[in-house]
Image: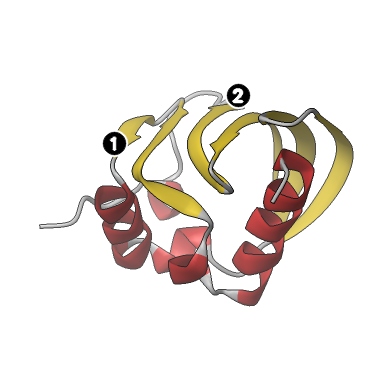
Amino acid sequence: MESEALAKEWFRLWETGEFEDLPISDEFIHTSPYGTIEGKTAYLDLVKVNKDKFLGHTFEIHDLISDLNKACIRYTAIKEAFRLEVTEWHYTRDSLIYNIVAYYNIEGEINKDRKLSMPD
């Protein structure tokens, strides 16, 4: 699966809540303003503990530029009154995403409802 198709599948699975089926490698790394999460298991564990913050969004894709092994996606994540403007780089290999670097602005202190909890 090429990087554009993987990116589209990534967002489809988030919108349907099927995050356990995300096309990510066991060595997956996700970097964002919240920090870096290393490993598929660690990432999925973090999502499970924070389902209320990760699930239930729709995504308005503004731009998706890709080649064979990477894609850059600019989108708005929307959940009720919450909107987050994001740009992500997805790096792919062997039909899986192995690295995502996400850029977005978190102004001021993070709202208590949006803070992530860490898995035990």
x%, y% of residue 46?
30, 54
Number of the front mark, 2 or 1: 1
Q: Which residue is drawn at the image coordinates 73% and 55% (left, top)?
A: 78
Q: Nearer the viewer, residue 63 or 82?
A: 63
Residue 81 in view, yes or no: no
Q: Which residue is mark 2?
A: 105
84, above or below 42, in the image? above
Q: Which residue is mark 1?
A: 38
8, above or below 4, in the image? below
Q: Nearer the viewer, residue 72 or 23?
A: 23
Q: Nearer the viewer, residue 116 or 1?
A: 1
Calculate the distance from the C-alpha at mark 2 to the C-alpha at mark 1. 22 Å
Q: Quadrant of residue 76?
A: top right
Mark 2, Cα crowd under 10 Å, few <14 / some 14-19 / many 20+, is few
Q: Quadrant of residue 64?
A: top right
x%, y% of residue 26?
33, 48
Position of the C terminus, as image quadrant, is bottom left
Question: SS class of the residue under badge 2?
Answer: loop
Mark 1, Cα crowd under 10 Å, few <14 / some 14-19 / many 20+, is some
Q: Which residue is drawn at the image coordinates 39% and 31% (left, top)?
A: 34
Which amino acid type is shown beneath numbered disc 2?
Asn
* Residue 74, label in figure: none
Colouring rule applied to residues? secondary structure
Tell me if 23 is positioned left or right of 83 in this view: left
x%, y% of residue 43?
33, 50
